[in-house]
Amino acid sequence: RNVNWKMRKIITFLGATLIKDREGNLVKTSYLHTGKIYPGSVFPEALRQFTSYDKMLVFVTEKAREVTWPQLEGLNDKRIIPIDIPTGNTTEELWELFGIILGQVDEGDCVIFDITQGLRSTPFLMFLFASFLKIARNVSIEAIYYGAFELGKDRPAPVVDLSDFVTMLDWLTATDQFTQTGNAGRLADL
């Protein structure tokens, strides 16, 4: 663990529905990560089993707090903290979400993003937020995980790490600096 990190935080979202079978029983999913299988009715249950962290910040809408939050609350882990957010129906609410996330991440933190649940705009926004935090707050982005539930019907759902794609924004910034100034230093570093 990097001793320079202030804190290692997971930023995750909960959707507002739980998957149930025809009899109304909660569907448990198994997630496959680095060759090992981890169970969970919501992905953060599995994520906490293969990731070390100081805090898991669980962003929940009012409905998600009611429907899916009890799955994590029942784990009785004081490091798992619900954070209330708006639904994200408007641009203003999305800016509010950005502000709420900024309020939870400190300079020098190490962050792991989980983009499995939430609105369809969540993955796009998290990549932008990750890039901003990396540059503006000197945050280390350790991973951006997606638990591919839909691929796990007859087998464990794969866990995909998308964090390498955050470097695309680094390449864009460095390329822009080069084309604007002729300075290829950042581009050469990449």
Image (tube, rainbow, N blue to C red):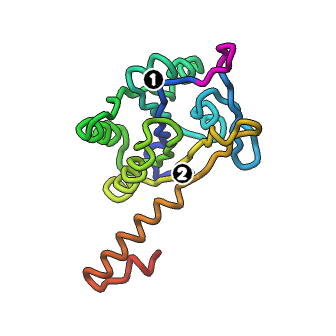
| Residue 97, placed above or below residue 124 | above
Q: Which residue is mark 1?
A: 64
| Residue 173, placed above or below residue 26 | below
Q: Is residue 141 left or right of residue 146?
A: left
Q: Nearer the viewer, mark 2 or mark 1?
A: 1
The amino acid beneath tag 2 is Ala
Please name the residue shown 54% across and 51% down the image: 143
The amino acid beneath tag 1 is Ala
Q: Position of residue 64 (x, y in %)?
A: 45, 23
Relative to the observer, which residue lies in front, 189 or 150?
150
Q: Secondary structure at mark 1?
A: helix
Q: Check if residue 133 falls in the magenta segment.
A: no
Q: Secondary structure at mark 2?
A: strand
Residue 97 position by quadrant: top left
Relative to the observer, which residue lies in front, 134 or 59?
59
Residue 36 position by quadrant: top right
Q: Which residues are magenta?
A: 19-26
Question: Which one is earlier in the sequence, the residue at label 2 or at label 1?
Answer: 1
Determine the residue located farthest toward the top in the rendered image.
23
On residue 8, the disc is none
The alpha-carbon separation of the residues under discs 2 and 1 comes to 24 Å
Q: Position of residue 87 (x, y in %)?
A: 35, 30
Q: Position of residue 13 (x, y in %)?
A: 46, 34
Dot 2 alpha-carbon crowd within 10 angstroms: few under 14, some 14 to 19, many 20 or more: some
Q: Which residue is mark 2?
A: 143
Please name the residue shown 68% across and 31% down the image: 29
Q: Check if residue 23 falls in the magenta segment.
A: yes
Determine the residue located farthest toward the front in the rendered image.
22
Q: Are marks 2 and 1 in contact (CB under 8 Å)?
A: no
Relative to the observer, which residue lies in front, 64 or 51?
64
Determine the residue located farthest toward the left in the rendered image.
92
Please name the residue shown 36% across and 38% down the image: 104
